[in-house]
Amino acid sequence: MSVEFAERLLPRLPEIVASQGTPFHIYDARGIVAAHKALARAFGEIPYRQYFAVKALPNPAVLALLRAAGSGFDCSSPVELRIAAAVGARRGDVVFTSNNTTPAEYRSARDAGALITFDDRSFAEKADELPEVVAFRVSPTGLAAGSPLMGDAAHSKFGVPAGELAAAYADAAARGARRFGIHGMTCANELDTGRAAQAAADVIRLGARVAEEAGIELEYVNVGGGLGIPYRLDDEPIDITAYADEILAAREKIFGVDGPRVITEIGRYVTGPHGVLVTRVINRCRKGHEIAGVDASMSSLMRPAMYGAYHHVSLPYAEGRPAGRFDVVGALCENMDRFAVGRELPEPRDGDIALIHDTGAHGHAMGFTYNGRLRPAELMLTDAGDVVEIRRAETYEDYMATVRWEFDRG
Ligand SMILES: *Cc1c(COP(=O)(O)O)cnc(C)c1O
């Protein structure tokens, strides 16, 4: 969570909790817009556009803010395309990067005027009509390979192997495609600026080689998302200016000043640090180790349980108490439902407000309703300092709304 967000939120949080109840996610509108603007500023004058990865935080209130700041949207499903359209995205404001996709889904992306990335040659072959602009996603190679989030080329489900790209473009050209891009999701939660930039430069270099081999010209290079954020207090944030400078230098060296435009579809970097999950401690117990139970579960934030991801936890109003090591757990009937294990904290007490930090990306969006632990509300701290509910908490009626069964609604 950014220092500015903490400074604006913490003095008011007890009052918000008193009126709203817990748990909820709250996002910092000012921080989100500032992060988008930092990206746009870093890439500067060259033809560049950032398309926010909708899956990271698909709340229309946040998307509308980003759109007003000039962001496009990266969608990966027909529903995400509709959400983007609902906040006013027009033809050209959307890229569609999905995998394991049906021809009908590609058709809806084409109808929305999206720039489409085909994840596999076979998907392009199945499409009844190719879009005007065709891009292929390259399998993780070089520095991008080996991430547990994506897998290396031999084990990843993503993208076209580098050696088959030229043939894929040649096929598309033979079927009438005239304009082309290339896509590489070059890293995942990467905090090393140099590695992130190098991985993107690898895609630019590969794009030049493939374009020459296939006899096509590239209009754009989409270097994907995957920039990390400082989840740990001692993590160094990405140097976004250095990242952009290195990509721009690679583009100019490889293609010259009139090279293809650069596209990013970054999610986490834009919204991740600008959200927190606000919970309250509801139980303390000891089972050989100390446990603090909070009123949120992994159904509100899956990352710690799913990938063992680190999220900082704080008890902002418990300073000065003796510290100890605590597991911070939710209520699901799954032992993995733990936000932190053996974490040093001031001694938690029932009723304490506990913050799980950096939930602005891949947080609420990954939520689910197992055990009837329904998804919590989303709030936003606006630039003007108002707190608005931008999605209410789910209710029993929501949970039952999709059921087809005769039952007594009383
Ligand atoms: C998830 C994803 C993104 C966004 O990743 P972040 O880590 O949130 O920046 C962008 N493009 C593709 C294809 C993705 O799968």
Image (cartoon, rainbow, N blue to C red):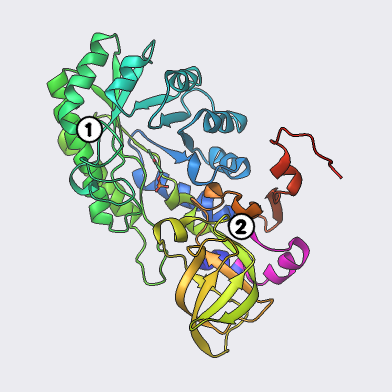
In the image: residue 28, left or right of residue 408: left
For the residue pair 252 and 163, the one nearer the viewer reads as 163
Q: Percent position (x, y) of residue 180?
A: 29, 21
- At label 2, counting other C-alpha atoms closer than 10 Å, the crowd grade (few under 14, some 14-19, many 20 or more) is many
Q: Residue at x 49, y 31 (%)?
A: 77
Amino acid under disc 1: Val
The tag earlier along the polypeptide, 2 or 1, is: 2
Asked if the stretch drawn in magenta spans residue 92, the answer is no
Image quadrant for the C terminus?
top right
For the residue pair 105 and 241, the one nearer the viewer reads as 105
Q: Percent position (x, y) of residue 225?
A: 37, 44
Within 8 Å: ligand 1 and the Cβ of disc 1?
A: no
Asked if the stretch drawn in magenta spans residue 24, the answer is yes
- Report which quarter residue 170 is drawn in: top left
Q: Percent position (x, y) of residue 289?
A: 49, 82
Q: Is residue 376 visible?
A: no
Amino acid under disc 2: His
Q: How many marks?
A: 2
Q: Nearer the viewer, mark 2 or mark 1?
A: 2
Give the magenta part as a residue range.
8-25
In the image: residue 273, left or right of residue 141: right
Q: Work out whether 12 lies above or below 205.
A: below
Residue, disc 1: 257
Q: Residue at x 35, y 38 (%)?
A: 45
Residue, disc 2: 25
